[in-house]
Amino acid sequence: MLGALLIQSAQLIVEEKLFRTYYLSPLKVVGFQGLFGICIYLVFLPIAYFIKCGGDLCPAGRLEDSLMALRGLKENYVLLILVIALMIDISVFNTLGNSVTKYASC
């Protein structure tokens, strides 16, 4: 958890320096962050699918079972709506956070 806090702090410092140095739209920055996250997961998830693990940590026998997750979204429309709502919520939160960083930073 401490590592995550340090990484997020570093990200916020870098964002503030970028906003001061370059003219960047907060919405574009959030878009690029989302694109970067998608690229990372496109690499990580297929690798994690083939990593075997057992016990309570991995009930399906794999570190990550993306196919099962996609089936769950297909079979349960409420879950799909919640995932879409969460994506919208996170994008609004990040856009507002970047706007505060850009316009309210000293």
Image: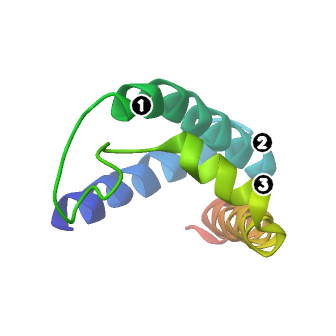
Q: Nearer the viewer, mark 2 or mark 1?
A: 1
Callouts 3 and 2 close, C-beta under 8 Å:
no
In primary-sequence order, the first of circles 2 and 1 is 2
Q: Position of residue 21 (x, y in %)?
A: 59, 38
Mark closer to the chain start, 3 or 2: 2
Q: Amino acid at mark 1?
A: Phe
Along the line of sight, the residue nearer the viewer: 62 or 32:
62
- Return the residue at label 1: 44
Tell me how the rendering is colored. rainbow
Question: Could you say where residue 20 lies in the image, as x and y percent from the top left?
Answer: 59, 46
Tell me the amino acid under the disc marked 3. Answer: Lys
From the top left corner, tell me how far across and down residue 34 is, in percent: 65, 43
Mark 3 or mark 1: whose residue is earlier in sequence? 1
Q: Residue at x 51, y 35 (%)?
A: 41
**Residue 88, quarter of picture:** bottom right
Residue found at x 16% / y 59%:
55
Instruction: Report the residue at 44% width, 45% height from top.
Output: 14
Residue at left 52%, top 53%? Answer: 16
User: For numbered disc 3, what is the local secondary structure?
Assistant: helix
Vertical order, 87 against 47 (above or below): below
Q: What residue is pinned by disc 3?
A: 74
Kind of residue indicated by mark 2: Lys
